Amino acid sequence: MSRVGTIARGIRTGVIKEGDNLVDITVNSVIEASNEEGFELQDKDIVAITEAVVGISFGNYCTVDDICMDIKNKFNVSHIGIVYPILSRNRFAVLLSAFARAMDKITMVLSYPSDEVGNDILDKDKLRNLNIPMSNYVMSESEYTEKFGDFKHIFTGVNMVDFYRDLAKKENCEIEFVFSNDSKVILDYTKNVLVADIHTRNETKRILKNEGADKVLGLDDIMTESINGSGYNKEYGLLGSNRATEEKVKLFPTDCFKLVNEIQNKFKEKTGKTIEVMVYGDGAFKDPVGKIWELADPVVSPGYTSGLEGSPNELKLKYLSDNKFANLRGEELNEAIKKEIIEKNKNLKGTIETQGTTPRRYTDLIGSLCDLTSGSGDKGTPVVLIQNYFKNYAD
């Protein structure tokens, strides 16, 4: 049998800037890496490109002033509520500067003990010791300051309430904080609400609209079209954006399906191989120490070729070895398991032989692998090549 399973390689491309030809850069970098390392590309290999360099090469940026203008035009009030933003200096802080620049006052409702993706806003042990309930309770800013004001995030060492307050003050905007796990609380302060949560945004919008809010918009409703020639994202708006500079935001990329198909066609032209291609953002995994769920983007992959549709349909080898083939060993066991894999049903969902497998979407699984491979710092590998991913024990 082949002794090598899935291989993930970070591919260095050089620094990518606005206007660069990402199709040629991606294809050429992978081919040069294969020549350098002496491996061959194969059909069903996967090439993944981080969304960051896609957005950069496309020039999909907007400024704080662009966002300020859009929020002013869409709300046409001087006081809004912001519900459930994530606690992020990279993701939300620069957006808050824009919102504060547009408003005289902001009331912000924060969930506790953590935000949507797991960033803590207070000491959980202290919360339990004080017997503060998780529901049907509203904590004022003064109560938070008295009981949890000394809290610092485990990784960043920053208290995000203080950080967000200072940002708003710099823009001469009054800001008040309310802590509650009931989004309807915001309606006691204002009927004009910007919903800032990511994966639960549609439910939050529905609740607030049903409770009589005058206007409810989400981050996905802001910067959905160009403002003064800026970039935009028609589908996701500000979701998936992050800081470029103090006054500039890189938006989640658009036209990704067009890009991945162009890259696939270029690989076919140059190598004769059918390579699957995807754009990936945050991986969908959770840190066991900080309890942070990594996925601050609206989706793991905003674009992928058709061969990456679907989910794994896999048998659990440990289950087969311990149960159906418990009396077999060595080559006899290997051959029995290979035969079982070759003859497996095309839809194993719900069967006992699949228990313990992870039949999530391919793009979510592969995106997590890519995010961990490329890292978020100075590795310089915005492209990841994955080989043998679709091969199993019987191949």
Image (cartoon, rainbow, N blue to C red):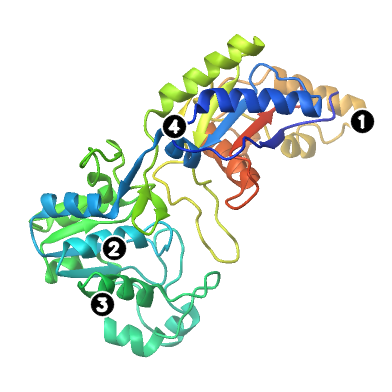
Q: Are marks 4 and 1 in contact (CB under 8 Å)?
A: no
Q: Secondary structure at mark 4?
A: loop
Looking at the image, tell me whether mark 1 or mark 3 is earlier in sequence order. Answer: 3
The three-letter code of the residue at mark 2 reads Ser
Residue 166 sits above or below residue 346 on the image: below
Looking at the image, tell me whether mark 3 or mark 4 is earlier in sequence order. Answer: 4
Q: Is 38 displayed left or right of 227 in the figure? A: right
The residue where tag 4 is placed is 19
Residue 391, visible in the rendered structure: no
Looking at the image, tell me whether mark 3 or mark 2 is earlier in sequence order. Answer: 2
Q: Position of residue 229 (x, y in %)?
A: 24, 38
- Residue at mark 4 to residue at mark 1: CA–CA distance: 57 Å
The three-letter code of the residue at mark 3 reads Val
Frontmost of labels 1 and 3 is 3
Residue 155 sits above or below residue 128 on the image: above
Q: Secondary structure at mark 2?
A: helix
- Residue at mark 1 to residue at mark 3: CA–CA distance: 63 Å
The residue where tag 3 is placed is 138
Residue 284 sits above or below residue 339 on the image: below
The residue where tag 1 is placed is 330
Marking on residue 97 = 2
Q: Nearer the viewer, residue 127 or 220?
A: 220
Residue 260, visible in the rendered structure: yes
Q: Quadrant of residue 336?
A: top right
The three-letter code of the residue at mark 4 reads Gly
Q: Secondary structure at mark 3?
A: loop
Q: Is 316 displayed left or right of 207 in the figure? A: right
- Residue at mark 3 to residue at mark 2: CA–CA distance: 26 Å
Looking at the image, tell me whether mark 4 or mark 1 is earlier in sequence order. Answer: 4
Q: Residue at x 38, y 88 (%)?
A: 147
Looking at the image, tell me whether mark 4 or mark 2 is earlier in sequence order. Answer: 4
Q: Residue at x 17, y 57 (%)?
A: 208
